[in-house]
Amino acid sequence: MTDQTPWPTLNAEITTCRACPRLVAWREQVAREKRRAYRDWEYWGRPVPGFGDVNGRLFIVGLAPGAHGANRTGRMFTGDGSGDTLYSALYRAGFANQPTSDRRDDGLALIDTFITSIGRCAPPANRPTAAELANCHPFLAREWTLMPQVRVIVALGQMAFDGCRRLLDEQGYDLPRLKFGHGLHTPLESAANPHRHLIACYHPSRQNTQTGRLTPTMLDDVFNLAQSLLVDDRAAR
């Protein structure tokens, strides 16, 4: 069973990080000015830690908190359209106990699943810089190290996919040349921890869902594949 002790320390380091002046200024400005629809909210306005089952075998990696989503609620993919799309798909696939995600205390629980991101602060125009992502990368690596039971990684979007590739390279996986594409499934092997899988998925942003680039069926296909891989992994043990 995963040691729970390091998690509070790691999450405290994440939520108090001020390494990137541009991101600190932006997340705090958004939290002060707010959006009219959320003027009664006290915004989180800080970096956002990972969320879910720290003993889970599904590891979902996104880009960064939304300015009026996780930057407002303090929980990954909570309170915006991306989260609505993602959590409804996780519910359909059996990875969440409910299809909606409005606030940290809404009763949502993830099943065999942990959600994190390559960036922890809401970035202007949803575009963190390479230097800002490099500052955040050790947080992702530490979460990964604390979860040796992970068997399936789902990367949401090109930038998250690139961040996962970097992480896996560092962890000793000999990856082939991979070009991002929705539904791309790559088996992973390493001497230390074989039989893992990387799945690429379009990000569930409104830009993708409202244009039809990502449909509910396409998202279901990704998480149904993840579920089948986890079933096979359990059967093989």
Image: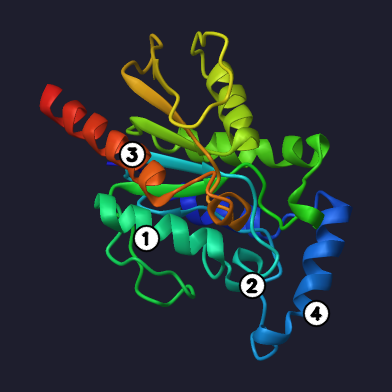
Which residue corresponds to mark 1?
Answer: 88
Q: Position of residue 2 (x, y in %)?
A: 33, 42
* Residues packed near mark 3 inside 10 Å, few (<14), some (14 to 19) or many (20 plus): some
Where 166 falls versus 191 (above or below)?
Answer: below
Q: Quadrant of residue 183?
A: top left
What kind of residue is marked 3?
Asp
Q: Position of residue 116 (x, y in %)?
A: 52, 48
Q: Secondary structure at mark 3?
A: helix
Q: Position of residue 230 (x, y in %)?
A: 24, 33
Classify mark 2: residues with Cα within 10 Å, few (<14), some (14-19) or many (20+): many
Name the residue tied to disc 3. Answer: 221
The tag on residue 112 is none
Could you tell me if the residues under marks 1 and 2 are in contact, i.e. CB atoms within 8 Å?
Answer: no
The residue pinned by badge 4 equals: 32
Q: Which residue is tagged 2?
A: 72
- The outermost residue toward the bottom is 40
As measured in the structure, the alpha-carbon distance from the residue carrying label 1 to the one carrying label 2 is 20 Å
Q: Secondary structure at mark 4?
A: helix
Count residues near mark 1 (Cα–Cα under 10 Å), then give few for <14, some for 14-19, many for 20+.
many
Whether 139 is drawn above or below 67: the answer is above
Q: In this picture, is 97 found above or below 10?
A: below
Marks 3/1 in contact by CB < 8 Å: the verdict is no
Which badge, 4 or 1, is on the more N-terminal residue?
4
| Pointers 4 and 2 in contact (C-beta within 8 Å) | no
Front-lying residue, 235 or 124? 124
How far apart marks 3 and 1 lie (CA) works out to 13 Å
Q: CA distance from mark 4 to mark 1?
A: 30 Å
Q: Amino acid at mark 2?
A: Arg
